[in-house]
Amino acid sequence: MSVLTRDEAQLRAQLLDVHRYTVELDLTTGDETFDSRTVIRFTARSAGDTFVELKPAELRTVTLDGQPLDPESLADGRLPLENLTAGEHELRVDTAMRYSRTGEGMHRFTDPSDGEAYVYTQMFMDDVQRVFAAFDQPDLKAVFEVSVRAPEGWTVLANGVTEQRADGVWEAAPTPLISTYLVAVAAGPWHSVRTEHRGLPFGIHCRRSLAPYLDTDADEIFEVTRACFDRYHEEFEEPYPFDSYDQAFVPEFNAGAMENPGLVTFRDEFVYRSAVTDTERQTRAMVIAHEMAHMWFGDLVTLKWWDDIWLNESFAEYMGYQTIAEATRFTDPWTEFAVTRKAWGYDADQRPTTHPVAPENVDDTASALLNFDGISYAKGASALRQLAVWLGEKDFLAGINTHFARHKFGNATLADFIDSLASATDRDVPGWADSWLRTTGVDTLTPRIASADSTFTLAVDRTGSRPHRLTAGLYDRDVADEGHLVLRERHELDVPQSDPQPLGRRPALLLLNDGDLTYAKVRFDADSFEALRAGLSGLPDPLTRAVVWNALRDAVRDGELPPAAYLETARAHLPRETDLAIVQGVLAFSSGQIADQYLSARERPAALSTLTSLCRDLLRRTEDGDHPGLRLIAVRHLIGVAAHPDTIAAWLADGTVPGGPEIDPELRWRILARLAVLGATDEATIAAELERDPSATGREGAARCRAALPDPEAKRAAWEAMFTGDDLSNYLFTATAQGFWQPEQADLVREYVPRFYPDAVAVSARRGPAIAQAAARWAFPVHAVDAENVALGEACLRDADPTPALRRTLADRLDDLSRALRVRGGQETPGEPHETREAQGA
């Protein structure tokens, strides 16, 4: 299939003015296809040729202004419209379209719990063509009138309020001007909970089998939704621009959520079947706030072309965290951002595939899809947080409101956004944008403390080019408790500095970027590092501790701190940590990267033993029942690092951890997966567990467990399911891949390492971007940390012509693998950075 280029989009936008789509969908025609009839009314400003995008199972008829066009002219997803005359036109298209099993286009899912079917759309980037014919680019906005014929007993949701007509067809209210990728439909026998707020209908929806769990959390979801809605109306002068606000939790969704105006779709893992931590509830709240922010930034004002993805995602990411901090019970979300999201951004920004927050060279939609990463989300949000500090919140919001007023229901560019911000301040916003949004990489800030005349001064050495406004925290040892560090004061700094900053007496710890207001790696002077080794857990503020843990993580990844030293620090301080996001983040890095990648097979058992002891300390600390979230994290991670099956097998048999928690479905599958890795369960036990939990999550758990069994036949079956057959949905593919590679089974799966590359290329070409990304992310042989694996991957990039989605994710995985080799102290891997970039086509 061809992809749309920027040049093609610009030419088409100059030629066309699209007014209205009338879309009729019939979902009663079977399980494989649905009918789609589209009428597009548009104006050609001059005579010329263009095309409409369409990817049908069958193209029945096409007429332009009443005259038939040849369906055989459709090629590579494009239907040519030749010799258009200037003036009004009407295009009619009648097709059968194919349901998706990969979360792209119109996804169809049958719930194994009760046999009910559900469908929903994910039109993002260029997938509207899988549902109806369209001039598919973000700057050709139009009004959409959508009607849907659905099976009896189904409810149809859409961008506007829907009503069922006398003939049984559901009709949605016409939308305001929106982009094609934002059109949404979700249909099925939904369980719905409805309310009203500020005169608008609000609804939340899920599969019927999840109804009890949604009902349990409905009050919390609505409370967060109302609080965010009210907060945005305090900050934004433009009112909410649509007629309703529905939130549908849908199955097998590829993203976290999608900002369809009036109908936000979420992955239905956010409807919790099992116990979760308060940090996980906070994450759900942040996603709700993030998607609601898009109603203004993305939906009301939309990017003109995909080079400005950051205008959507960075803004929503920043506003999501800021809004839940200001408007909900979750008052410290920036700690989780620092530990989880920011680390995602730092990692992405240090790979050879890095790109500016606002790149200038996004030539086509395939290239644009690759930029939905930690840079467009976390780095961009960090840049906006820094901008708000630099401008001041008042001027920052004034500029944003100017932007909404100037471009509502239209499209805008980076230049438009910068111009709106500049109108609210006398600061050099274009210069700031050039420094922060057009550059790549992570700056590193290192303190330099000097003494003069019995007083100390601070200068900051910067590796990089960006200006930073930040704070430096000065901490002294607590005279009553040497294990605690007490904040003396915070100094505001601008880097680069004109003069060193006076400090007074030397602090025990000097922490740059205390408060995490900028985006940079920070280092410690020798005395500060020693103070941290004794007093990290005694730092009074969780966000301060998060900055320190991030700095230690960066030092490990950069080869400046031995992985064992990080584990020692975690062993000493994590049992006293109170913030759940920090505990979760440190344990995840310790097990997933240090134990599984950065340490050799010989060193790994000792690391697992250390992590097991750490988790047991956390369990002992939480025996009183006052810290259920912390205890749940400890249980999950103890299961994951268990080197022997006895303890966790006893938990599974008893149905509980002594002292709690009960072993709910999520924990049961987690234990069974680890027992499978250790060879302490079998197919019969997995089948019995699936009979006990026949849900969609149960099917994924069973697939993960079966792929993890240390049995050659189980591995062969899993591999064939992923790479030979095309029956696995996107979620079942991922679950199978997650089970397949295990460090404990390196010898058993060694033969599959060289097979991965040609098989991944083939399945990506057959099944498209979603499976390509799943293959590279989850089915990649991440535990084969050796030069041979890197060489195989580089040869694949160079010679095998992988699809863009596979190429990008594979290049990232290989760079991570090379970093792991360097951390292990191995020799440089084949290929200098510039050669890797060439291989990626960057």
Image (spheres, rainbow, N blue to C red):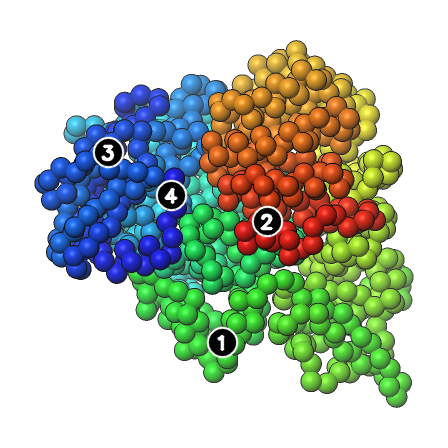
- Which quadrant holds the C terminus? bottom right
Q: x and y percent of residue 785 in the render?
A: 75, 39
Instruction: Please give the name of the residue rendered at 26% of the width and 60% of the height, measured from the top-left corner.
Output: 14
Q: Does 72 sit left or right of 321 as displayed? A: left
SS at mark 2 in the image:
helix
Q: Earlier in the sequence, mark 2 or mark 1?
A: 1
Where does label 4 land, which residue?
A: 2
Instruction: Please give the name of the residue rendered at 30% of the width and 42% of the height, measured from the top-left corner.
Output: 78
Q: Residues within 10 Å of mark 4 (few under 14, many from 20)?
A: few
Q: x and y percent of residue 223 in the render?
A: 47, 47
Q: Which labelled disc corresponds to residue 72?
A: 3
Q: Which labelled disc corresponds to residue 749?
A: none
- Which quadrant holds the N terminus? top left
Callout 1 amino acid: Val
Callout 2 amino acid: Ala
Callout 4 amino acid: Ser
